[in-house]
Image (cartoon, rainbow, N blue to C red):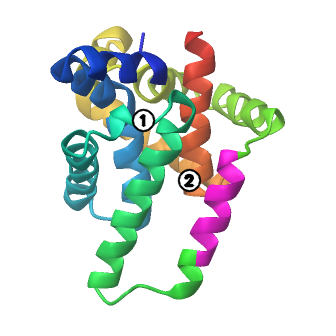
């Protein structure tokens, strides 16, 4: 079971190592997947997320942020770092920024109907794919843990996860909205 945003912030205030561990466990994979959807470079996506985590801890943002805004803060920070990457690569387009900001505003005010639609879409995936997404994305399991529970290889978990997320992104093409809602679904399931 993953920690809630409130538990993550409380852990940071008690012990920075524990807070960092909980933050990583809860947000690393969703943020890397989100970042990958924007800059299409797996290694750089991981670097972006690590940079955001580093700045979050170094700047002691956890002392000033609330549990209600943690998710938005992290996704927005990753989005801005990705856009800076794109800008640095000369592939940055102003229209993309406007589209991303509109999606971000929509994601912050998500609707229960959309959460339900995503849950239903996950339920309609093939069984192994659905179980993989539930375990890795929504349940916070490592690839290795999911592979052991599903009795498949780690590479199979990666393939199933990739196919499942590709299908879900096809149905819900706005990356900020999709990954923030996956986070909301996960928090709601753990409460």
Q: Position of residue 126 (x, y in %)?
A: 59, 29
Whether residue 35 sits left or right of residue 14 in the image: it is right
> Is residue 124 depicted above or below 8 in this figure?
below
> Is residue 163 depicted above or below 10 in this figure?
below
Residue, disc 1:
160
Work out whether residue 189 or residue 156 is closer to the camera in this orientation and state it: 189
Q: Position of residue 6 (x, y in %)?
A: 47, 20
Q: Residue at x 53, y 45 (%)?
A: 72
- The dot on residue 108 is none
Q: Quadrant of the C terminus?
A: top right
Whether residue 181 sits left or right of residue 50 in the image: it is right
| Mark 1 burial class by Cα count in 10 Å: few <14, some 14-19, many 20+ | some
Specify the segment rendered in magenta. Answer: 98-108
Q: Quick check: can you spot residue 39?
A: no
Work out whether residue 101 or residue 40 is closer to the camera in this orientation and state it: 101
Q: Position of residue 172 (x, y in %)?
A: 67, 51
Whether residue 153 sits left or right of residue 169 in the image: it is left
Question: SS class of the residue under badge 2?
Answer: helix
Work out whether residue 59 or residue 121 is closer to the camera in this orientation and state it: 59
| Mark 2 burial class by Cα count in 10 Å: few <14, some 14-19, many 20+ | many
Q: Residue at x 50, y 20 (%)?
A: 131
Q: Position of residue 78 (x, y in %)?
A: 38, 56
Residue, disc 2:
176
Q: Residue at x 42, y 40 (%)?
A: 30
| C-alpha distance separating marks 2 and 1 | 22 Å
Among the two numbered marks 2 and 1 on one chain, the one whose residue lies closer to the N terminus = 1
């Amino acid at each position: 079971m993953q920690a809630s945003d409130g538990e993550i912030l409380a852990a940071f205030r008690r012990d920075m190592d524990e807070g960092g561990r909980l933050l990583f466990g809860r947000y690393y994979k969703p943020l890397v997947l989100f970042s990958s959807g924007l800059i299409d470079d797996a290694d750089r996506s991981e670097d972006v997320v690590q940079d955001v985590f580093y700045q979050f801890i170094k700047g002691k943002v956890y002392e000033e942020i609330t549990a209600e805004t943690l998710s938005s803060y992290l996704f927005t920070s990753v989005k801005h770092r990705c856009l800076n990457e794109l800008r640095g690569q000369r592939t940055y387009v102003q229209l993309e920024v406007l589209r991303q900001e509109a999606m971000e505003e929509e994601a912050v005010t998500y609707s229960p109907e959309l959460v339900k639609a995503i849950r239903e879409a996950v339920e309609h995936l093939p069984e192994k794919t659905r179980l993989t997404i539930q375990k890795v994305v929504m349940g916070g399991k490592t690839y290795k843990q999911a592979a052991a529970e599903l009795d498949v290889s780690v590479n199979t978990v990666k393939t199933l996860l990739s196919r499942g997320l590709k299908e879900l992104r096809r149905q819900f093409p706005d990356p900020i909205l999709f990954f923030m809602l996956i986070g909301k679904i996960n928090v709601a399931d753990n409460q």
